[in-house]
């Protein structure tokens, strides 16, 4: 699809959103105080709650995504542009079997329609040629757990099974523990395991302990609906991956609010990686991460948070080619930190101005026996950029969102021009502490002697039209610096509508 056609596609979706908004606004005009549920809303509520012990719902997310150079780093290479629709549908149910015990399930699927030859390694012809058209993929039970609250008449909640952990560290931006399935993008976020949360109100402290067990192959623990696994005649895995290796680990976090307007946190994380059959880019590792956070609101106009962590352990990564380590184990010594300082105007438009910063260490190519690459663990998701995570595929052996070797800082502005609508804009200057990416799949696309990644710009317009309908328009750009060989421009455009029942 041409850039012009892509722009028309996004404008068409935007016009649809604005049209429906107008209809919604007319319906709500002059309503005054919140009225009782309308007959339609009451009917929806009754359908979703057929029994006192059962509730259910569903949603449909339609995304059109277009990006250029994010994967290839330059328009000189085939497949530099991608244009596709992601159609995610989900249905969920919650059953209350006892007063404090619930069973939670959710079924999810996300077929994708590619308008250009697909970047996806799973959507290719028998000869390996990228395809266009509909990729149906499979259905997956991405939530299946039992949740028990107030155990032993104590403020203790235990969840067993497949669950959306969504940042067990109580951090502000899903740092280190958030998504156990980076291989399928934002289709699912689940982790298999157990989680216990205890709220010790007497000492204003929350304790959170989790055990995580993830498998690389989709359908390994709970069978998928439709085929998700396949191998080539040579034994290489050609099916869908949730992640590149089997992973287990434990997370312990503590958050204390004894100091007024301040939260102090600490955490310890252990992660074990184990290679699986047919996946060449998987690794073996034992990673230990210890860190802490501090956040607070010292006045009605100011907010802040700071997080930091140090990693040690050992890793056997076969994709490291600078220096040549012959697939041997190396000692980990890495660190990272991120922070935000926000000024709240407290005006009618909810204006907020922030300064954001982050640093994740990169692997030093001159240290033979040490791996300095900071591993983001279970947080390979678009924490601050939807586009830039794709640029790491060529930099970190094909692993999207394995973000490391980066320093960034810059301003961010958000405001709400009208009810239900928000707009944000962010600029970051991006740097690479190490000029040589030691796990690069295409070393020739990096200059090998530059430390400036480039100028990053993001704008996002969101609007919630009703309880059942919302959408956004999202754009990102990177003007590449001397870290890259060609110094091209990366771009990203996305239009989304979300229908919720």
Image (cartoon, rainbow, N blue to C red):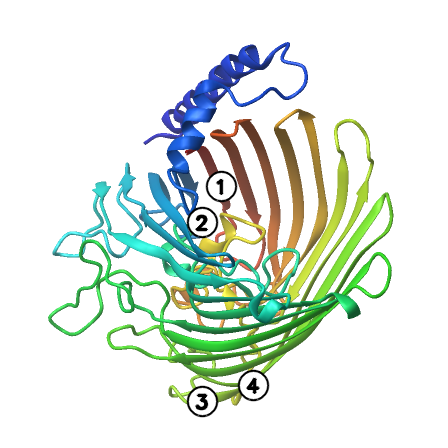
Q: Secondary structure at mark 2?
A: loop
Residue carrying label 4? 367
Q: Is residue 190 above or below residue 384?
A: below
- Mark 2 or mark 3: whose residue is earlier in sequence: 2
Residue that mark 2 sits on: 70
Q: Are marks 1 and 4 in contact (CB under 8 Å)?
A: no
Where residue 452 appears, as percent x and y from the top left, is 62, 58
Q: Earlier in the sequence, mark 1 or mark 4?
A: 4
Hey, which quadrant is residue 84 in on the image? top left
- Residue 208 falls left or right of residue 282: right
> With 208 as the anchor, is 255 left or right in this view?
right
Tell whether label 4 touches label 3 (CB within 8 Å): no
Between circles 3 and 4, the one closer to the viewer is 3
> Between residues 471 and 327, which one lies in front from this camera angle?
471
Q: Residues within 10 Å of mark 4 (few under 14, many from 20)?
A: few
Residue 329: assigned label? 3
For the residues labelled 3 and 4, the Cα–Cα distance comes to: 13 Å
Dot 4: what SS? loop
User: What residue is rendered at 64% in x and 72% in y?
Assistant: 253
């Amino acid at each position: 699809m041409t850039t012009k056609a892509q722009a028309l596609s996004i404008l068409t979706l935007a016009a649809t959103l604005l049209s429906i908004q107008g209809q919604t606004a007319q319906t709500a005009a002059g309503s005054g105080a919140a009225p009782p549920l309308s007959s339609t809303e009451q009917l929806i509520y009754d359908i979703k709650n057929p029994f006192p012990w059962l509730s259910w719902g569903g949603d449909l997310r339609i995304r059109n995504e277009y990006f250029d150079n994010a994967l290839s780093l330059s328009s000189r290479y085939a497949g530099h542009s991608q244009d596709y629709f992601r159609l995610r549908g989900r249905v969920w149910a919650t059953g209350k079997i006892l007063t404090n015990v619930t069973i939670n399930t959710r079924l999810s699927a996300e077929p994708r329609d590619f308008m250009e030859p697909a970047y996806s390694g799973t959507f290719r012809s028998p000869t390996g040629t990228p395809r266009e058209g509909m990729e149906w993929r499979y259905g997956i039970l991405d939530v299946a757990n039992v949740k028990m609250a107030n155990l032993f008449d104590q403020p203790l909640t235990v969840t067993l099974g497949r669950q959306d952990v969504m940042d067990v560290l109580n951090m502000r931006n899903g740092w280190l523990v958030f998504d156990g399935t980076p291989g399928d993008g934002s289709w699912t976020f689940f982790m298999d395991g157990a989680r216990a949360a205890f709220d010790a109100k007497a000492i204003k402290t929350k304790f959170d302990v989790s055990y995580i067990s993830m498998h690389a192959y989709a359908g390994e623990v709970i069978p998928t609906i439709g085929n998700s696994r396949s191998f080539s005649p040579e034994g290489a895995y050609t099916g869908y991956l949730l992640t590149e290796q089997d992973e287990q680990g434990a997370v312990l976090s503590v958050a204390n609010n004894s100091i007024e307007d301040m939260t102090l946190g600490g955490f310890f994380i252990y992660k074990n990686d184990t290679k699986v059959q047919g996946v060449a880019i998987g690794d073996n590792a034992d990673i230990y991460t210890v860190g802490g956070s501090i956040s607070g609101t010292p006045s009605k106009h100011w907010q802040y948070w700071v997080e930091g962590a140090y990693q040690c352990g050992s890793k056997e990564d076969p994709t490291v080619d600078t220096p040549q380590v012959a697939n041997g184990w190396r000692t980990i010594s890495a660190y990272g930190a991120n922070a935000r300082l926000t000024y709240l105007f407290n005006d009618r438009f909810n204006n907020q101005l922030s300064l954001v910063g982050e640093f994740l260490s990169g692997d030093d190519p001159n240290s033979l026996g040490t791996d300095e690459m900071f591993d983001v663990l279970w947080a390979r998701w678009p924490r601050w950029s939807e586009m830039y995570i794709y640029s790491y595929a060529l930099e970190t052996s094909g692993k999207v969102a394995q973000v490391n070797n980066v320093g960034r800082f810059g301003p961010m502005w958000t405001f709400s021009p009208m009810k239900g609508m928000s707009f944000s804009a962010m600029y970051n200057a991006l740097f690479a502490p190490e000029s040589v990416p030691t796990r690069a799949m295409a070393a020739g696309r990096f200059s090998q002697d530059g430390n400036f990644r480039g100028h990053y710009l993001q704008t996002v317009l969101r609007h919630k039209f009703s309880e059942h309908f919302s959408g956004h328009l999202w754009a990102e750009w990177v003007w590449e610096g001397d870290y890259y060989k060609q110094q091209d421009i990366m771009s990203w455009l996305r239009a989304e509508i979300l229908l919720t029942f």
